[in-house]
Image (cartoon, rainbow, N blue to C red):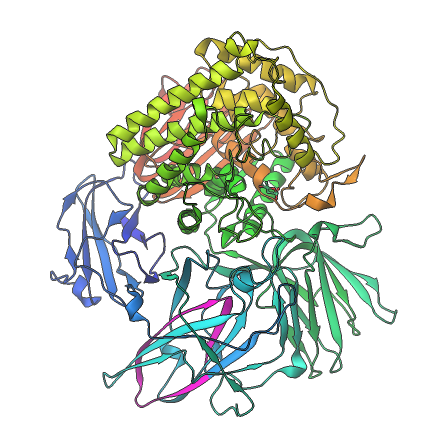
């Protein structure tokens, strides 16, 4: 039996409110049958569910199409209009020509035209300034409906954040909506089905407005980076049973008042005085005489678009593992709880106290040696919540419009008995299915994987950020560029990155430059992210294409990538990017490397070549043949320029160390070195690089090898020199953000799997497991965030939840467990299973829920036998390559076979090698 399920539209199941006019549909075949695949499909789309049962699907009937395509099939039926709901299903013929039909699914369009909006922007008086936080305005409006309700939709957004309610009930479970975009260019709206929340007679619409990213503190800057005050923009459209239509919009008839939410800010925290609650404020019958009429505002010149990625939600809860630890008897009791996990979100407080008692909650990732909270690394982020009791028995409170990054919580001033029930951690992030899992026989590596996943949770809060706790939390392009591949193993990030790619489009400068943080932050930051940061504009969409087979993200961003290429070509005379005399930004270098500064122009030129390589492939697959050739030539030119400038035995040898190069190295020192005490091993002799020009670093070898920039005959020498540098450091890496992600791949792909495992297993810093041995539960920003010798690193920049070094995760999946995409059949249509055991591991397992279904690679050494279990989902195929030197006799599902590489169709395969 074949079942057709997991119907998705634009990566979502039954999405309400999309504005993609040719949405892409996908489905999965579920069956255990070996060799199962799709040979044909037929999609039916209709205005009603009934239309799918008979033969008259009024919107679209593809007829039988001979094709194995089961993801990203674009809707090509009657053109779609605002508010339209489309029901659809699919019939799939398998390899035996048997047909199976899916259950119906649907998608519903949002408002496609700016003219669909009749709402006005409304808000309270202007309060607060660049640094002073403000109370949240509460807004309300009552309205009458003369007949029972047939259906109702709310289209809503805000400058700042909103929480809407209807007749006292909060609408939906999204938080931090409308999400973070460049609010001066684009604002997202959300759509909710509120049919069940309203009724004939009087109804009341309420909204609370928060500061969020648009009005609150962003980065290390002030408040009000995008707008001065929060505003609401909402349109409720109701169809009554008598057929009449009613529209209730935000306009001058609304009223507002301030209430219990005294301040709210992502970085500063939230204060709530429950004594100021206004019971019934968002229900009918409330006396709002004391409330003022709102102000209305001109439409900001921005585009309103439907949310095209996941929204942020409260995803899970965490109970403290210890505590309360503290002094109960002092005047102001103080307790510290350990949540056991460095998490992102807030805590829910439960307790009772006399009216007017204020408790203060403070948050930190780590503790000082004396057990107190270490908050210095939060910089200006106050990260403090407070709650004032109303004194009416048990009270439960959680913030709405703030989040913190913390493991430890200090509760101050609570007079009653405190238990682990007093607080509960609420973890918030963008809603993304966890798709991948990696596990092996080493508990430390399993903890590393855990830490990587938690770093992803905490930093995928609407935008991929560097950190979630200090006054920064920005969409650093370099960080996601290095982490995106790993992220796509752990979770379904396709929608999230589709949204962010649009943010990149909005952030691109006139000249084609891509800034270092996206969404663009208005003040202070430079316009060009520089090498390995700005290149995210190409690398991220390419990665989404390879992992999800998504061609559209390349199509939609092709122009951005091309303009970006023009920008860097223009800035790179002789194809040397960030040459010493370049007057623009030289980049962040190999950020946070350990006494190993790689010249900026080496990094820049390497990334120019890599971009050109990716662009020639992208242009080719989009059908731009001329561009494909141009970029291929560019790759060759940049590769040649790289060799001329940086390799030994070329004309570069004759160049002395120029002043410019010195300047770059000094620059690098001052910004990235901090208080590192690692031994400086001095220059090494090299037959690969020109040591007159620079001291070769691990990252220099890594980039040259990984981006294929060396002549073939120098590659093995380069690998040897890289390895000897690692050996000289007693098997330690010296790489920063740029080199680290590629390091293990370069070693394992070039015959030094042993050294890759040695680095993976290294427990003294710098290494991936060092932080794990120190009890870390997330990935640290720096290799030496805390060391026994030096204590905490420079508090000016020392996050304990930064996903960049978590990029090792991709190697755990693709080399240790051996799962990898085949970029020529992306999205795991065809994939590789090529485990490379080593490092003393007895077993390893990776599972991955792809768009086609679940893939598994699980291996184990047991009693002299190597066993490998592989699952290949229906409608895909895989090539399994067994590790070398593990035995001669191979069986699959008990049958003897010859060879060590196997092309396989869907099914479960148990290999044994003896
Ligand atoms: C710091 C953070 C961030 C990095 C930039 C360059 O703010 O470490 O992760 O991308 O610097």
427, 669: nearer the viewer: 669
Apparent side of residue 42 relative to residue 166 in the rendered image (left or right):
left
Determine if residue 518 is in view. yes
Outermost right residue: 330
Q: Indicate whether residue 154 is drawn in magenta.
A: yes
Apparent side of residue 517 relative to residue 618 in the rendered image (left or right):
right
615, 363: nearer the viewer: 615
Residue 451, image quadrant: top right
User: Residue at 49% of width from left, 59% of height from top?
Assistant: 312
Q: Indicate whether residue 709 is drawn in magenta.
A: no
Residue 668, image quadrant: top right
User: Residue at 59% of width from left, 73% of height from top?
Assistant: 127
Percent x, y of residue 604: 50, 28
334, 386: nearer the viewer: 386
401, 564: nearer the viewer: 564
Residue 888, image quadrant: top left
Q: Quadrant of ligand 1?
A: top right
Apparent side of residue 412 relative to residue 739 in the rendered image (left or right):
right
Determine if residue 832 is in view. no
> Magenta segment, which residues?
141-166
Percent x, y of residue 71: 29, 45
Q: Count how many numbered circles sit on residues in the image.
A: 0
């Amino acid at each position: 039996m074949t079942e057709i399920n997991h119907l998705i539209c634009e990566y979502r199941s039954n999405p309400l409110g999309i504005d993609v006019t040719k949405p892409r549909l996908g489905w999965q075949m579920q069956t255990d049958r070996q060799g199962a695949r799709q040979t044909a499909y037929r999609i039916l789309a209709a205005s009603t569910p009934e239309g799918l049962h008979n033969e008259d699907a009024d919107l679209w009937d593809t007829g039988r199409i001979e094709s194995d395509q089961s993801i990203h099939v674009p809707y090509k039926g009657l053109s779609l209009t605002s508010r339209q709901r489309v029901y659809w299903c699919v019939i799939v013929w398998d390899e035996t020509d048997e047909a199976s039909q899916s259950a119906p699914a649907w998608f519903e369009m949002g408002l496609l035209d700016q003219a669909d909006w009749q709402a006005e922007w409304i808000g309270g008086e202007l309060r607060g300034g660049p640094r002073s936080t403000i109370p949240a305005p509460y807004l309300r409006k009552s309205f009458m409906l003369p007949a029972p309700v047939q259906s109702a939709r709310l289209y809503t957004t805000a400058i700042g954040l909103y929480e809407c309610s209807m007749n006292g009930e909060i609408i939906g479970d999204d938080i931090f909506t409308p999400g973070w975009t460049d609010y001066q260019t684009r604002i997202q709206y959300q759509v909710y089905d509120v049919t069940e929340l309203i009724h004939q007679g009087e109804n009341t619409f309420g909204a609370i407005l928060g500061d969020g990213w648009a009005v609150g503190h962003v980065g290390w800057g002030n408040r009000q980076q995008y707008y001065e005050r929060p505003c609401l923009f909402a349109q409720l459209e109701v169809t009554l049973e008598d057929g009449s239509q009613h529209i209730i919009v935000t306009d001058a008839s609304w009223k507002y008042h301030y209430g219990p939410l005294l301040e709210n800010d992502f970085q500063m925290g939230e204060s709530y005085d429950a004594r100021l609650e206004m019971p019934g404020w968002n229900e009918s019958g409330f006396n709002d005489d004391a409330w003022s009429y709102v102000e209305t505002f001109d439409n900001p010149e921005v585009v309103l678009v439907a949310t095209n990625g996941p929204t942020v939600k409260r995803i899970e809860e965490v109970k403290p593992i210890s505590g309360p630890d503290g002094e109960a008897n002092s005047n102001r009791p103080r307790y510290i709880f350990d949540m056991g996990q460095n998490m992102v979100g807030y805590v829910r407080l439960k307790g009772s106290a006399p009216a007017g008692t204020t408790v203060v909650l403070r948050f930190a990732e780590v503790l000082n040696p004396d057990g107190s909270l270490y908050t210095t690394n939060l910089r200006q982020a106050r990260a403090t919540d407070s709650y004032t009791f109303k004194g009416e028995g048990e009270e439960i409170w959680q913030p709405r419009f703030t989040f913190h990054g913390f493991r430890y919580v200090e509760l101050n001033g609570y007079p009653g008995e405190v238990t682990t029930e007093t607080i509960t951690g609420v973890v918030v992030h963008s809603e993304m299915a966890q798709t991948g899992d990696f596990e092996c026989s080493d508990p430390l590596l399993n903890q590393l994987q855990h830490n990587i996943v938690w770093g992803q949770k905490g930093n995928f809060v609407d935008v991929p950020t560097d950190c979630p706790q200090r006054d920064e939390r920005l969409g650093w392009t370099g960080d996601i560029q290095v982490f995106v591949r790993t992220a796509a193993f752990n979770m379904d990030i396709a929608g999230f990155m589709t949204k962010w790619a649009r943010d990149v489009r909005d952030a691109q400068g006139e000249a084609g430059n891509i800034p270092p943080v996206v969404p663009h932050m208005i003040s202070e930051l430079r316009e060009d992210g520089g090498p390995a940061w700005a290149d995210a504009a190409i690398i991220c969409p390419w990665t989404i294409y390879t992992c999800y087979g998504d061609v559209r993200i390349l199509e939609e961003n092709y122009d951005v990538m091309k303009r970006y290429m023009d920008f860097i070509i223009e800035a790179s005379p002789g194809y040397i990017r960030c040459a010493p005399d370049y007057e623009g930004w030289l980049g962040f270098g190999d950020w946070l490397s350990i006494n190993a500064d790689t010249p900026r122009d080496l990094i820049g030129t390497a990334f120019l070549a890599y971009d050109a390589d990716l662009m020639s492939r992208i242009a080719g697959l989009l059908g731009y043949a001329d561009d494909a050739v141009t970029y291929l030539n560019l790759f060759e030119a940049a590769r040649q320029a790289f060799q001329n400038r940086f390799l030994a035995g070329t004309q570069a040898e004759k160049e002395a160390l120029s002043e410019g190069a010195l300047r770059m190295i000094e620059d690098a020192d001052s910004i990235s070195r901090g208080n590192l005490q690692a031994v400086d091993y001095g220059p090494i002799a090299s037959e690969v690089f020109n040591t007159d020009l620079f001291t070769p670093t691990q990252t220099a070898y890594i980039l040259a090898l990984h981006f294929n920039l060396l002549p073939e005959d120098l590659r093995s020498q380069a690998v040897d020199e890289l390895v000897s540098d690692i050996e000289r450091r007693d098997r330690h890496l010296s790489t920063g953000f740029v080199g680290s992600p590629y390091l293990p791949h370069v070693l394992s792909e070039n015959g030094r799997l042993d050294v890759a495992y040695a680095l993976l297993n290294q427990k003294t810093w710098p290494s991936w497991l060092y932080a794990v041995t120190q009890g870390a539960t997330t990935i640290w920003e720096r290799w030496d965030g805390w060391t026994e010798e030096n204590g905490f690193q420079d508090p000016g920049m020392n996050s304990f939840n930064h996903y960049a070094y978590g990029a090792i995760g991709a190697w755990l999946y693709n080399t240790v467990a051996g799962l990898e995409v085949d970029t020529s059949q992306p999205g795991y249509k065809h994939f590789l299973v090529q485990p490379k055991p080593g490092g003393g591991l007895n077993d390893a397992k990776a599972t991955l829920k792809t768009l086609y279904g679940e893939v598994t690679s699980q291996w184990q050494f047991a009693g002299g036998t190597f066993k490998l279990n592989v699952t290949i989902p229906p409608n895909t195929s895989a090539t399994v390559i067994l590790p070398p030197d593990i035995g001669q006799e191979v069986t699959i599902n008990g049958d003897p076979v010859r060879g060590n590489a196997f092309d396989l169709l869907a099914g479960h395969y148990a290999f044994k090698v003896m």
